[in-house]
Structure formats: structure tokens, C-alpha cells
Amino acid sequence: MSVDMTKWREMAKRHVHDRPAGTGRLAGKITVVTGGAQGFGKGIAQELHREGAAVIIADRNLPLAESVAAEMGGNTAAIAVDVSDEESVANLTARTVEQFGGLDLMVANAGVVRSGPLASFEKKEFDFVTSVNYTGLFLCCKYAAIIMEAQHEGGPAAMFDIVAISSKSGLEGSNKNFAYAGSKFGGIGLIQSFALELCAKNIKVNAVCPGNYLDGPLWSDPERGLFVQYLQAGKVPGAKTVEDVRRFYEAKVPMNRGCLPLDVARAALFLASEEASYMTGVNLMVDGGWMAG
């Protein structure tokens, strides 16, 4: 059941022209970055803040989110969120409106990966990936749209953005990584569909499809990282160590390196800027040429 957002819709509608002071390409924009305490999310949050946005660091790890917000300084806040839980996402949205007066940009970045062979893959793991990557994207878009549509009523000329951080695996299959790839394929379908529905309310909906952040915790964590998961799953033929797995993936990128948070942050910033005012329903590849090969 949807959470009643009437109070927050009305508040956002009234305050659509009241924005925090700032300088830069996103001056005064009120922004939420889910999964913003580390990895791509942290890099995105930092870049948006440098460009003048007020930024909510939304993450399940509240202490880490608070630390990131403190590092960034003014016009930031940290809010705990579980994107797979509707009440949690509604609370995030309400608190953002309460603290800053509205919501101009939702960056739906939170995501998880579980990999392994089909025959032995547990349903609970499949459900977990789907609940965060697919259902979580739906919920973030839903509650952002509730606020943004109200703001459109209060300021018909204003523009708003939803940017989903998808993956190159949302555009091509991924061997023994089907739960993740399937959730990202589904997410692209959501983004394109929401773009069609919401453009009449001046809400642009786009996706960034990054390559692999090989230096980030998603890949490098010594216990649950993808290097370890892929080695154990036998995803890379002949690999004996995590270094073998890393070299395999580096060699697949024409630009010969993994994707970095700044690469993704710049793409998200572009999609939310005036330069991309005529772009919606886009899947922007940031993969060092991987998909061109």
C-alpha cells in the first residue's frame, strides 16, 4: 500500500521556487543519491555537491553516510534507507522535503550483486538482488515522481530529473550473473517507460550504464567481492586467483582500465544539467568502449 504523501506534496509544491544557495551547474538543486556512502554513489554525491547541489546521502549504512556528509560540508544530510522497503523510501522522500523543501534530482544508485551457476543458485539470493535493483528502482522513481509532479503544479516551467545507475549488464547477458543482469535489464525497461509517462510533467528519466569499478568494494571486497564470487563460480575459464579474474576483465576494456566513480558522476551530472534538457529515456554508456568491442 502506498504511503500517504499529501503533506509532503503540498510542502514541495509551495516551496518549488525556494532553493538553497549555491554556485555551479546544479546550483540550488535538491538531490538524493541512494547508496551514496561509498563506491559510485559517493563519487556522484561529491561531484553533484561540488557543482552546487544540496545532497542527501541515502544509505543503509547510516554512520558511513553521516561521515560522507560531514566530509562534504554544508547543504548535505545523511538519511538511512532500505530501497527495497516502501515505507523506508517514502520516509527518505518526506525527510528530504522537510529538510530542504523539495526534490529536483533523484539518483537511484543503490544496488547489489549475487552471482553463481543457475542450477545451484538460491531463490533467496535471487529475490534479494531483485528487491534492491529492480523493486528498489521502482520505489525510488515512484516517490520522486510524487514530489516532482506536485512541484510541476507549483512551477510549470521547472525541470526535474531521475537518473538510474544501471550497468552494461543491463544491455547484454552476463554469464553466471543472471540475477544482476536480469534486474538491470528490467530497470532499463522501467526507465524508458517512466520517461514516456513523466515527460509531460517536465521530469526527465535517464540511465547511466557504467563499466566495472574494479577498485571498488563491490569487486574488491576480500570476502563477498565479485573477484571472489566470480572465481568461486568458475565464471572466468582457467582463473586460479582473484588477480587472474581482474586481469581478465581489464583486458576486455579497450581503454584498459576499470570505470571510476568520477566517470559515472560526470555522466550523471551531464544528464541532470541544462545541456541534456532534450534527453530522456537515454541509456548512457560509460564503459571505456566495452560494448563497442
Image (spheres, rainbow, N blue to C red):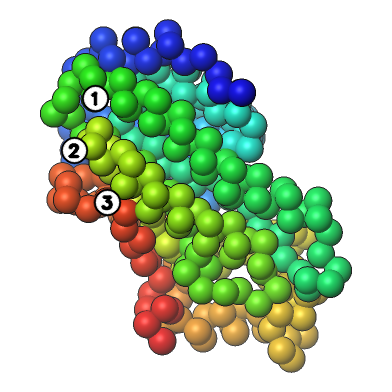
Q: What kind of element bears circle 2?
A: loop
Tell me if mark 2 has few (under 14), some (14-19) or many (20+) residues whose alpha carbon lies within 10 angstroms of its own: few
Q: Amino acid type of disc 2?
A: Gly
Q: Amino acid type of disc 1?
A: His
Q: For the C terminus, give its image quadrant.
A: bottom left
Q: For the N terminus, give its image quadrant.
A: top right
Q: Going by the picture, which residue comes out furthest to the bottom?
A: 238
Residue at mark 3: 280
Residue at mark 1: 152
Ranked by sequence position, the earlier of labels 1 and 2 is 2
Q: Nearer the viewer, mark 3 or mark 2?
A: 3
- Residue 17 left/right relative to 101: left
Tell me if mark 3 has few (under 14), some (14-19) or many (20+) residues whose alpha carbon lies within 10 angstroms of its own: many
Instruction: Provide residue 179's location: percent of width, then percent of height.
Output: 67, 61
Q: Amino acid type of disc 3?
A: Thr
Instruction: Provide residue 81's location: percent of width, then percent of height.
Output: 59, 30
Q: What kind of element bears circle 1?
A: helix
Q: In the image, what residue occupies the spot 26% across and 41% down?
A: 199
Q: Is residue 100 visible?
A: no
- Residue 124 left/right relative to 167: right
Q: In the image, what residue occupies the spot 33% across and 62% down?
A: 284
User: Is 131 above or below relative to 234?
Assistant: above
Tell me if mark 1 has few (under 14), some (14-19) or many (20+) residues whose alpha carbon lies within 10 angstroms of its own: many
In which quarter of the view is residue 126 placed? bottom right
Toward the viewer: 170 or 269? 170
Ranked by sequence position, the earlier of labels 1 and 3 is 1
Q: Is residue 288 visible?
A: yes
Q: Residue 24 bears which disc, if any?
A: 2
In which quarter of the view is residue 161 placed? top left
